[in-house]
Image (spheres, grey):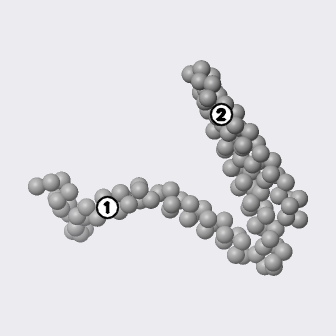
Amino acid sequence: MKNTDMIAINNTGSVENGKLEKMGNFLNRHSNAIICIAMLSIMFMGIASASSAESLWTTVAGLIKTWVTRLGGVVMFVGGIMFGLGWKSDDAEQKSRGIQTLIAGAIVGGVAALTGTFFA
């Protein structure tokens, strides 16, 4: 008899025949998608509550500016880490990739900071 075939009965007398384990495995496999959906739904609740088209546009532009700027910062951070690890291992290609990633993050952050100019 396998461990997965065992049936456990808790204090209330209900059967927990691996359903909890299956649900846990499902949540572990799909946790990234669940978190993304939750974040998007929270962000769009603010958009849906906007009263006019102009305030909706302002809200969307503000969200784009905030989140794309943060994304650029994260990419810059990753590029800095890659560059530092390239120095540690004395790998010229990794140093080059790190600098390229750092510059790409700076470009993304700079363009995001200009969204007020583009969307005004």
Taking 79 as reference, is 22 above or below it?
Answer: below
Vertically, is 54 above or below 35?
below
Coordinates of residue 13 in the picture (x, y in percent): 21, 68
Label 1 belongs to which residue? Answer: 22
Q: Is residue 28 above or below residue 88?
A: below
* Distance between the alpha carbons at the discs numbered 2 and 1: 40 Å
Q: Which residue is painted at 80% across and 51% down in the image?
A: 111
Q: Is residue 24 left or right of residue 91?
A: left
The mark found on residue 98 in the picture is 2
Query: Which of the 4 quarters of the picture holds residue 79?
Result: top right
* Residue 83, image x, y percentages: 65, 30
SS class of the residue under badge 2? helix
Circle nearer the viewer, 2 or 1: 2
The answer to whether the residues at label 2 and label 1 have Cβ atoms under 8 Å apart is no
User: How would you rate the neighbour count of disc 1 (Cα within 10 Å): few for under 14, some for 14-19, many for 20 or more?
Assistant: few
Q: Amino acid at mark 1?
A: Lys
Residue lying at the far front in this picture: please name it: 93
Task: Indicate the position of residue 64 as horizontal and vertical percent values.
Answer: 74, 60
Q: Residue at x 78, y 67 (%)?
A: 59
Place of residue 38 in the rendered image (x, y in percent of width and height, measured from the top left): 56, 64
The amino acid type of the residue labelled 2 equals: Gly
Q: Residue at x 66, y 71 (%)?
A: 45
Q: Is residue 48 left or right of residue 27?
A: right
